[in-house]
Image: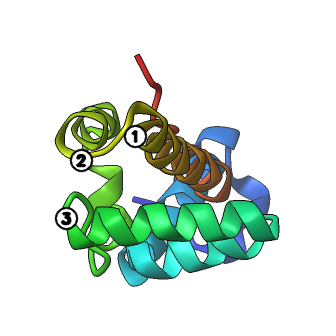
């Protein structure tokens, strides 16, 4: 059982960490991948934003990512396997595949920071 917030002075570090993670975890259900991508793109330079927006449009169009999936669903996904799919299943030259992969890796790194590690950054092999 998680103690009430009014008892916060009596919380152990472990209990406080559990409450914090649970709050972040529950909030992931209310945010879609599309919403998170939009927020992610806002912080990028103009050129990078255009390139990454194009990359995500392809990922959505080719159904490698579902724009309506919640971030909780993304957190449960094997992100390295998804990255491998992006590299293998999309047509195009190697440079094009690399920038699409880079967009996904950068996005997952952004999510790792924003979710305090509940979503991890995809690691390329």
The residues tagged by marks 1 and 3 sit, at their Cα atoms, a distance apart of 13 Å
Disc 1 secondary structure class: helix
- Identify the mark at residue 124; answer none if there is no mark: none
Does the residue at mark 3 contact the one at mark 2 (Cβ under 8 Å)? Answer: yes
Which residue is drawn at the image coordinates 29% and 70% (left, top)? 60
Mark 2 and mark 1: span between their CA atoms?
Answer: 7 Å
Rendered residue at 43%/65% (across/down): 56
Q: Which residue is mark 3?
A: 62
Label 1, on which residue? 97
Q: Position of residue 12 (x, y in %)?
A: 68, 43
Farthest residue, direction front:
93
Q: Quadrant of the C terminus?
A: top left
Mark 3 or 2, nearer chain start = 3
Do labels 2 and 1 touch, CB within 8 Å?
yes
Dividing the picture into quadrants, the one containing residue 45 is: bottom right
Disc with the residue nearer the chain's start (1 vs 3): 3
Q: Is residue 46 left or right of residue 71?
A: right
Label 2 vs 1, first from the N-terminus = 2
Instruction: Give the SS element for disc 2.
Output: loop
The answer to whether residue 118 of the structure is visible from this angle is no
Q: Position of residue 79 (x, y in %)?
A: 33, 40
Q: Residue at x 30, y 35 (%)?
A: 87
- Residue 78 lies, in percent from the top left, at 26, 38
Q: Residues within 10 Å of mark 3 (few under 14, many from 20)?
A: few
Residue hosting label 2: 90
How many other residues sit within 10 Å of disc 1, few (<14), some (14-19) or many (≥20)? some
Mark 2 Cα within 10 Å, few/some/many (few <14, many 20+)?
A: some
């Amino acid at each position: 059982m998680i103690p009430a917030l009014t008892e916060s002075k009596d919380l152990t570090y472990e209990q406080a960490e559990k409450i914090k993670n649970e709050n972040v975890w529950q909030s992931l259900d209310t945010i879609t991948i599309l919403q998170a991508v939009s927020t992610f793109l806002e912080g990028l330079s103009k050129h990078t934003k255009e390139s990454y927006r194009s990359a995500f449009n392809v990922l959505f169009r080719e159904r490698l990512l579902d724009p309506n999936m919640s971030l909780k669903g993304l957190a449960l996904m094997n992100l390295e396997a998804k990255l491998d799919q992006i590299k293998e299943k999309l047509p195009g030259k190697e440079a094009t595949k690399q920038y699409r992969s880079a967009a996904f890796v950068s996005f997952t790194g952004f999510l790792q920071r924003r979710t305090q590690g509940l979503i991890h950054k995809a690691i390329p092999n």
